[in-house]
Amino acid sequence: MGRRVEGDGMPKDAAVEEFAALVRALKARDGRSYEALGRRLSVSASTLHRYCSGATVPEEFAVVDRLALLCGADEEERRALEAAWTEADCARRRAASPAPTPVPAAPEPGPGRGPAPDPSGPDPTGPDPTAEDLSAPEAPRARPRRGAPVALLAAAVALVVLALAAALLGHPTRTASAPDPAPASTAPGRTAAPLPFTWSIDSQLWEGGCGHTYLVDRAPRAVAPPPVAADSGAWAGTHGAVHGGEALVRITVQGRSPSDAVVLHALHVRVVDRATPLPWNAYRMDNGCGGAVTPRHFAVDLDRPRPLARPVDGLDASGAEVRKIPAVSFPYKVTSFDPEELLVSARAAGCDCRWYLELEWSAGGRTGTVRITDGGKPFRTSGTRERPAYVHDSVAGRWITDPDSGQTG
């Protein structure tokens, strides 16, 4: 975590701006949201946003280095990023240095205090002016001043009274050797430890990067052309789209330790709501596409009363021979250096289903279950049977019905 370098409205240090620009470039290259990247880095979305805006500089380079690795930075880029962070961190430390404490002014004389010493008076280190001089006539002796001893005695009594009052009230005076109080983030009685791994999802995947169907409650003239796959989330959100027929969800799981593995035991499917399929138009994002590689995945039939996540082998037909990609079989181990991606294909034909996943894990004598949702909400997949289907004619610049495109289905 970091500290604010400068207050809002103040010009930021040039080193901080340069560092923030590099972080923003990494985030833009990756394309994932602040929340998704923050989960992978074990920081909040708002903290990552402050790194990108230059409002905050991380106190350690490790979190920035993990971001660089996640976003595919090479060794040279990571070295440049570390150099920029070092300069920005120096600026942060300079800004955080406390200002010199002003010297308090001398107190005004008050009741019970003697008058301030007269600078023009005799030097106290010199000979005593009241000493008896045999060569001069005897003069009246000066009366000793009593104000200063009285003031010192009153101050000592006041300190004793304050110390006794603090002890009686249960607030002992803090000394330099006393331990610092617990951070505000650790509530009394809280014993829950953080997860030994991080996870993130991408719920707007397309088959082969080009094939997908969305259900949208709009007429074709009110629907924008299909986006590129990287912008599918924004397009779906703008149109209130629901996955039609199939939803592809990729879950990335990564341990926090390079040596202490986390064991993944099972992936469960929980359907929280079933309804009749949505009576909306179906919009296909392609005119037919395919790929040479079918990734290994977990197949889920949401129409079943108790759907299961069934592991399915993948196929690689990019070479001279078709090669099988073995399915992920539980239990499965992950570390910080050996993450795993779990791809789930959830299909629905006769329902509008809302569902989520549960991932069972164990590590270091601990066990648990993580609920995997779509940003806190259930995933949603609806059947497209007998719904009007449209594809986009890029030449005419409009959506056309499926028979007009020469396709069936």
Image (spheres, rainbow, N blue to C red):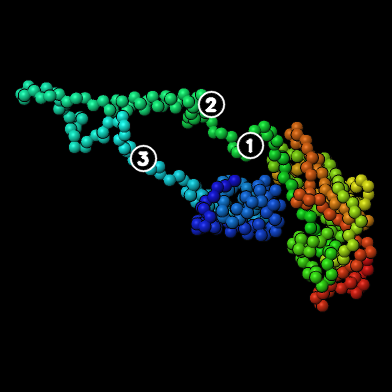
Element carrying mark 2: loop
Q: Which mark is residue 186?
A: 1
User: Where is residue 35 drawn, in percent x and y?
Assistant: 69, 52
State the residue position of label 3. 104
Residue density around tag 1, few if under 14, some if 14–19, many if 20 or more, within 10 Å: few
Q: Residue furthest front?
A: 111
State the residue position of label 2. 170
Q: CA distance from mark 1 to mark 2?
A: 23 Å
The three-letter code of the residue at mark 3 reads Pro
Q: CA distance from mark 3 to mark 2?
A: 30 Å
Q: Earlier in the sequence, mark 3 or mark 1?
A: 3
Q: CA distance from mark 3 to mark 1?
A: 37 Å
* Nearer the observer, 68 or 399: 399
**At x 81% / y 50%, what residue is drawn?**
378
**At x 93% / y 61%, what residue is drawn?**
385
Residue 241 higher or lower than 94, as above or below: below
**At x 66% / y 48%, what residue is drawn?**
44
Q: Quadrant of residue 289?
A: bottom right
- Foreground label between 1 and 2: 2
User: Where is residue 29 drawn, in percent x and y?
Assistant: 67, 60
Left or right of 395 in this view: 70? left
Residue density around tag 3, few if under 14, some if 14–19, many if 20 or more, within 10 Å: few
